[in-house]
Amino acid sequence: MAHTLPALSYAFDALEPHIDALTMQIHHDRHHQAYVDNLNKALAGTDGENKSLEELMANISAYPAAVRNNGGGHWNHSLFWEILGANGSQPSGPLADAINAAFGTLDALKEKMNTAGTTRFGSGWAWLIVKDGNLEVTSTPNQDNPLMDIAEVKGTPILGIDVWEHAYYLKYQNKRPDYLGAIWNVINWDVVAAKYNAAL
Ligand SMILES: [Fe+2]
């Protein structure tokens, strides 16, 4: 089955001024589309063609680098679009309790995620994951993710922040910390909470 680019559930300019419309358009329509196209090319005619994206991630060490890079790129960006939104929500319920239990406060979680993102050299992702029922913050290089069998820290991502320059360079240039400071204004915590409940 060929993989396809998921549509955004909001307009390109919905995250303004924190993430600009042109960045969103290029990021979704060109970068993510390229991961999807290159993944389909890399899988064509192989047994991986019949595997789900999650099955590929769990056994990624058995596949060529093109599947790792583009499969990860497809999975990671699909999550990223979902957990963004303009609703200005806050964590509530069991997720809020789990954040407070693991990190003390929501601000402490944000700081830990931002540190994971700023200290990730080059390109990669900062993650909030569920691991053995608990919340943890981790990061991965390139388009790797914590679902992959080669990940240093494995778990189920419920929130991922893209720290590739293509995610912020037009508006923030080299100032990755400014982008990381702003993105918390547009996290859709209802989606993160649903992913937390599903991961438990
Ligand atoms: Fe990206």
Image: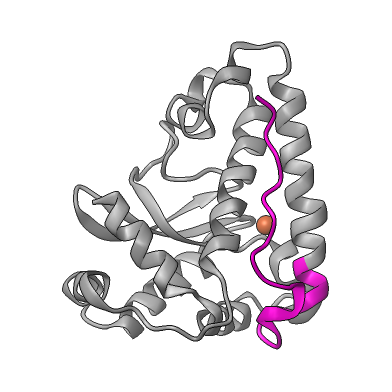
Q: Quadrant of ligand 1?
A: bottom right
Relative to 20, does residue 35 appear above or below in the rendering? above
Q: Position of residue 93 (x, y in %)?
A: 23, 75
Most foreground residue, 150 or 43: 43
Could you tell me which residue is drawn at 38 percent across and 42 percent down? Answer: 152
Residue stretch rendered in magenta on the structure:
1-24
**Image point 37% across, 57% down: which residue?**
195
SS majority, magenta: loop
Residue 117 is situated, as x and y percent measured from the top left of the image, at 51, 66
Give the side of residue 81 with respect to residue 26, left or right.
left
Label tally: 0
Q: Position of residue 70 (x, y in %)?
A: 67, 37
Q: Nearer the viewer, residue 192 or 11?
A: 11
Residue 113 percent location from the top left of the image:
42, 70
Residue displayed at 66% across by 84% down:
18
In the rendered image of this protein, does residue 122 appear above or below residue 2? below
- Location of residue 109 by image quarter: bottom left
Q: Is residue 84 left or right of residue 103?
A: right
Q: Is residue 16 magenta?
A: yes
Residue 85 in view, yes or no:
yes
- For the point 48% across and 45% down, which residue is it? 145
